[in-house]
Image: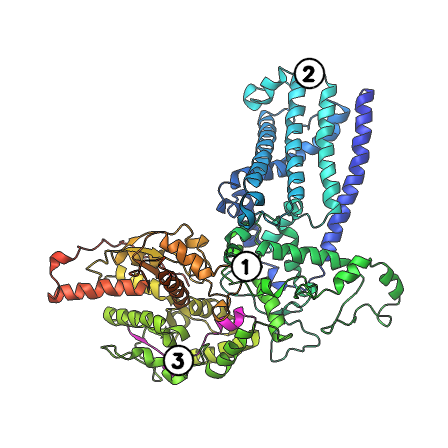
Amino acid sequence: MGALQLTLGIIGVAVSLVAWGVFLSGVVRMVRIIRLGQPDATRNGPFAPRMRTLVVEFVAHTRMAKFRSVAPWHWMVMWGFLLGSAVLFEAYGEIFDPAFHWLLIGTWAPWLLLVELLGIGTVVGGVALAIIRQRNHPRRADRVSRFAGSSFKSAYFVEAVVVVEGLGILGVKAFKQASGLEEPPLWTSFVTAPISTLLPSEPDWVSIMAITKLLSGMLWLIVVGKNLTMGVAWHRFSAFVNIYFKREDDGGVALGALKPMMSGGKVLDLEEADPDTDVFGVGKVEDFTWKGLLDFSTCTECGRCQSQCPAWNTGKPLSPKLLITQLRDHAFAKAPYLLAGGSRDVAGDEVGLTEDKYADYQKRLESIDVLAMAESERPLIGGVDENGVIDPEVLWSCTSCGACVEQCPVDIEHVDHIVDMRRYQVMIESNFPSELGGMFKNLENKGNPWGQNAKDRLAWTEGLDFEVPVFDGDLDDTEYLFWVGCAGAFEDRAKKTTRAVAELLHTAGVKYAVLGPEESCTGDPARRAGNEFLFQMLAQQNVEVLNSVFEGREPGKRKIVVSCAHCFNTLANEYPQVGGQYEVVHHTQLLNRLVRERRLVPVAPVTEDITYHDPCYLGRHNKVYEAPRELVGASGAALREMPRHEERSMCCGAGGARMWMEERIGKRINLDRVDEALGTAPSKIATGCPFCRVMLTDGLTARQNEKAAPAHVEVVDVAQLLLTAVRHGKALERGDIPTDEVGSGTPLPDEDKSPTT
């Protein structure tokens, strides 16, 4: 050991002691801050499926791979960080003794190959990620960039450290070979071996490269430990925890059902809740659960959520990424006040940090810096004049489409957090867009958002040449209850879908019945708007009706078919929360099965070009993609996919109760989607949800009025396409249409697929 090695070694150890101290102190502070959140016992288990999900997501990069251009480079960097830690610790010995290596594995050929690959992968991956960030820089595409609003300094710092670490790994290995300290097989050192021939045979350089490798890592620890909001760095640790504790223990994302309103770690019973002690939604950052605070701490600022958000892409102020980072920054800035025991009531008065509660009141008060105290006074939701953390326009721009949740590589649950904040605004503050007031009133008094009379729920049956069976107290041999939904019963355009579904079920000989006036809104718009009390009232009322309808039937035979994607999601995924267990299928799933079973035969094809719009609450929220597309194919139409389809489908703008709110900022979401649909040059735009149909029709009409769309294009439900083909086929059988005027049809798939419920 020479003087150089001794000097470098002492420097390395001294810096390491400081670095590890700073970093571990940061870890402790972060854990303490996350624990400020409300308890959430739903994340506790089971262990095996959660661990399986964690392993699959990080080993196979299943979530990251949704952006294929990024996934391989990130995968290299991730493994370089995880396995490269062993190489980093090896540097402590290499500084003092250039010939040092780990016992047993240090000279093992497979280990030498792994070190080679780690070094190469880390350098290549780090450089590639920096290039990707540059190619998507906001200066090139304004707010379209998914990195708009992200911290570039933090990202480049992390990527620079990654590259330096990789160069250090390769440098140590190359200088060891140049100095004759290692003579590995060429296949284990195919990069460093050729480089070593160009380097001086000087062992001191091994120590220099080793401390370079070590100090870059220690610098990273110090910077990260001092900056708890540097999510691009902290996600290296917190992402594993966040993925393990994701909402769905089976590995699914936090879509479909909304999380029930909780207080103190338990589902809140609204009939017994106490406003003085219970938490109603989220009114302060500490009202989020600890998982929410962990979500905020884990955000990498990659902007995938932002790139998919329909609000952001049409000029609205909402960016899911920026919303999460604003909540993160606020939580960590306010943390000293909360850790000292501070708390404010609804009126903003101090109720936590008082003299009668703490004997060391003055000491606690003095421990809070001025900035933390100022942060504690900020309202969570408020405009610029109120110095709010989240602007109301941001909160109410969300369509709850779930694109952000679907794309997030670290499983952040944006929609649940947004709805929780809406719940507080509606139920405690009574502060919500004025248009929602009328909708809430109609739901409460009339059982539907339009305020129509219940006796008119069967008006859609008028003009049909067959009788629609209405439930009369006994299902008998009825197989399905047809849940029509409010739109399907009252909205003129949606009534066409309802009639088409009813006629197809009648043609196929399916035994079904409707509830008629006994049906009421499922409560979807109320819940997405944050009015949990109104949702609970409607849901319990409907569950009582449905349970009485299905009384005496075993659970597996309580079948409901739904033509509205929102009703489908609510009945299938959210009614179990209030005691309603049913087998729910969407009409596209049931009709597709009937076609496969040859109970519906589309003999004459609809020879048109069709583009299909995936409803968010059918597609992303419930993963029903194939059934409607197969129906388009069965009808004989040619499907032309839009650029954004299936899990990346663009929202129509109706979800999250936005159908009843005006769009005053930016481009209308439905116009953006219609423009994309028209880009496929279709004859018709098909969908599988009445909400989508209304929004797309309005957008198409606007474009046709502007002469920007052909007059012959129309919006239809896939059920109407199928009905046209089936009706046409019946006419052929009767001889009403010459056979040379129609095609011969398209072959149908042989095997059925189980419907998703």
The disc placed on residue 179 is: 2
Q: Which residue is mark 1?
A: 316
Q: Which residues are magenta?
A: 511-530
Alpha carbon of mark 1 to alpha carbon of mark 3: how far? 44 Å
Select label 1 or label 3 by which is in front.
1
Left or right of 200: which side holds 723? left
Labelled pair 3, 2 in contact (Cβ < 8 Å)? no
The residue under the point 55% across, 59% down is: 316
Labelled pair 2, 1 in contact (Cβ < 8 Å)? no
Q: Quadrant of residue 86?
A: top right
Mark 2 or mark 1: name the one nearer the start of the chain: 2
Q: x and y percent of residue 504 in the render?
A: 27, 69
* Crowd band around label 2 with a 10 angstrom C-alpha radius: few (<14), some (14–19), many (20+): many
Asked whether 528 falls inside the magenta stretch, the response is yes
Position of residue 463 relative to residue 253, above or below, is below
- Badge 1 element: loop
Q: x and y percent of residue 68 in the render?
A: 48, 42
Position of residue 327 relative to residue 659, above or below, is above
Mark 1 or mark 3: name the one nearer the start of the chain: 1
Q: x and y percent of residue 658 in the render?
A: 50, 67
Mark 3 or mark 2: name the one nearer the start of the chain: 2
Name the kind of residue labelled 3 in the image: Val
Left or right of 525: which side holds 9? right
Q: Which residue is mark 3?
A: 549
The residue under the point 76% across, 46% down is: 226
Q: What kind of colouring is applied to the model shown?
A: rainbow
Q: x and y percent of residue 713 in the render?
A: 31, 60
